Amino acid sequence: MGVKLKEEFLELLEKDKEFRYTILGYLGIGDVIKRLDFLAEELTKLREDFNEMRKEMIELRQEQVKLREDFNEMRREQVKLRQEQVKLSEELAKLREDFNGMRREMIELRQEQVKLREDFNKMRKEMIELRQEQVRLREDFNEMRKEQVRLRQEQVRLSEELVRLREDFNEMRKEMIELRQEQVRMREEFGKRLDRVERTLEKLTLDIEEEAREVLEFRLREMGVDVRLERLELPELELDIYGVSGDVCVLGEATVRLGRARVEELARKVERISTKHPDLLRPKKVVVIYTSLATKDALREAERLKIWVVKATEDVTSPPELG
């Protein structure tokens, strides 16, 4: 198909003058070619005039021979002829100058022709590159079509997968609703159990505080201090155990399980009372914690801070010296 198109294109260029000028005009060299044709026509006319003048020169020379033969008779005509000859010489000189100018224009036209040929070769090279690019574009287009087919197949597969995912999602949604309902039931049940635990802890806390006061009052009486213990409530803190007897004051806490943090908290409370409520203290302080279970770390901290840790059956740390 490309060879046939090329042959038709070359045939039109060769036979159809208007088509050739149209192509040249599209390429930007139509005006130059028209100018060349105009110059060629002018040059033809100039050559015809020059040949005509040449013929006249021959006739003049023949006439000059005749005049030389009839020299005596045509002397006056000869002067006139010489004048005309001078005029012709001047015209001939002018013609030579015009001819030289035309020659220079011909040289320029030839140079322009060379340039046009170079431009034509360049254009031809660009056309070859365009055809190669067209081939590459067609290959890319075919590849793109194949990719489009693959994408459509993938789209169909994804659509089917989406349908399955929607079904799975609806199933999961039903399960989530059931789980949420079960969670609500469990939360209600947990709330009920938590209320029972809180009531139990509250009762246990009250019980252990009362137990702590009874046990510590008994132990202090054994140590020679008769004191009534009760709960101390201040705006900034509370103590489970507090009592004063003479120059002795008792400050303490009661807890089921004793950890190091509870020991450090009691020490801070005692320090705060010493700073803000010194009137509640006495020269001899008994800092005590009553517990059922104590960690080793808590006991080490209590020993360091000289806090008395007491169980119902024994002294876990050394009791204070009140003598």
Image: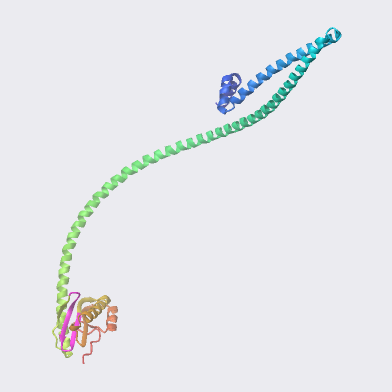
Pick the quarter of the image with the C terminus. Answer: bottom left
Q: Say whether residue 152 is magenta.
A: no
Q: Quadrant of residue 15?
A: top right
- Asked if residue 232 is positioned above or below residue 319 in the image, the reply reads above
- Asked if residue 118 is positioned above or below residue 321 in the image, the reply reads above
Q: Quadrant of residue 251?
A: bottom left
Magenta segment range? 235-252
Q: Say whether residue 236 is magenta.
A: yes
How far from the left and from the top, in percent, is residue 70?
85, 7
Q: Residue drawn 20% across and 54% down?
A: 181
Q: Is residue 278 visible?
A: yes
How far from the left and from the top, in percent, is residue 36?
64, 23
Q: Residue drawn 80% across and 15% down?
A: 82
How far from the left and from the top, in percent, is residue 196?
15, 67
Q: Residue drawn 78% across and 15% down?
A: 83
Q: Is residue 62 visible?
A: no
Q: Main secondary structure of the magenta part?
A: strand
Please tell me which residue lies in front, 256 or 15.
15
How many discs mark residues in the rendered view? 0
Pick the quarter of the image with the N terminus. Answer: top right
Task: Find the residue positioned furthest to the front.
Answer: 76
Color scheme of the displayed model: rainbow
Question: Is residue 223 found left or right of 121 in the rendered image?
Answer: left
Q: Quadrant of residue 314?
A: bottom left
Question: Is residue 141 found left or right of 65 in the rendered image?
Answer: left
Please tell me which residue lies in front, 199 or 305.
305
